Image (tube, helix red, strand yellow):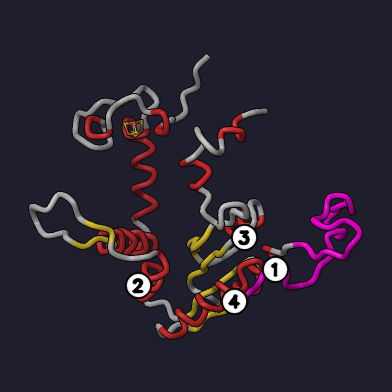
Amino acid sequence: MKDSYPSCASCPFPKEERLCSVENGKSPATCPTRDNDLIDEVRKEYSDPGIREFVRQASVQEGEGYSGREPGNTTPKPAKPRILEIAEFAKRMNYSKLGLVFCTGLSREAAIVESFLSDKGFRVVSVMCKAGRTPKEEIGVEDHEKIRPGTNESMCNPMLQAFALNRAGTEFNIVMGLCVGHDSIFLKYSKAFCTVLAAKDRLTGHNPLAAIYTLDSYYRYLKKE
Ligand code: SF4
């Protein structure tokens, strides 16, 4: 039996003909743009002034991520790297204290980011994943499950990262290279809104889409059992 959940990723219609692109456009039965209850529910959430301003500024930032936006130009160009967008967005929101959580494997990059943001006038509070030096055994990891069995390994501690930033009262937190799952814990426990600067992908130099772009060629072995 077919379920009734949205499946935009496999929408059968060309983008320019879809209901989410044009009035009276085409849509499959499970299309969320047809779901007026859902749209109303979300609209209510956006009526909270804090959320509304946040999402409004995010959309303004989105627009300003392009050059060549003068009327009549149909091909605006991307103009800014994400790190600059983060700094600009934080300024728009009048944030002064930013959190930065990072993986030990990106320590050098974290120092660069910290200095970039400090130079832009922000106070940056940063916490590395291994902070707390908590042994993996404490969460039930067995020796053979470590990266290097037979050695002492500290767990990544995303909850500690979140609690430290919560305690510091950071207004906006930047995630850089946390592991799959560790990032989930951080995102759940961070009190401030978060954004991701980099998603960890050890194999591709933190460019997870490299495997997606080449999933039918170099990375096709990933599709096998
Ligand atoms: S038309 Fe509906 S189902 Fe298709 S992509 Fe847009 S929102 Fe998703």
Mark-to-mark CA distance, 1 and 2:
28 Å
Residue at the disc numbered 1:
160
Task: Count neighbours of disc 3 (C-alpha within 10 A) and say few if under 14, some if 14 to 19, many if 20 or more.
Answer: many
Q: N-terminal of the two: label 1 or label 3?
A: 1
Q: How many numbered marks appear?
A: 4
Which disc is residue 88 wearing? 2
Mark-to-mark CA distance, 4 and 2:
19 Å
Q: Which structural element holds mark 4?
A: strand
- Indicate the quadrant containing the C terminus: top left, top right, bottom left or bottom right: top right
Label 2 residue near ligand 1, CB within 8 Å:
no
Between circles 1 and 3, the one closer to the viewer is: 3
Residue at the disc numbered 4:
126
Q: Residue furthest top?
A: 1
Tell whether 160 sits left or right of 68: right
Query: What amino acid does circle 2 point to?
Result: Glu
Is the C-beta separation of discs 1 and 3 under 8 Å?
A: no
* Magenta stretch, residue numbers: 126-155
Q: Specify the quadrant of the image occupied by residue 99.
A: bottom right
Residue at the disc numbered 3:
178
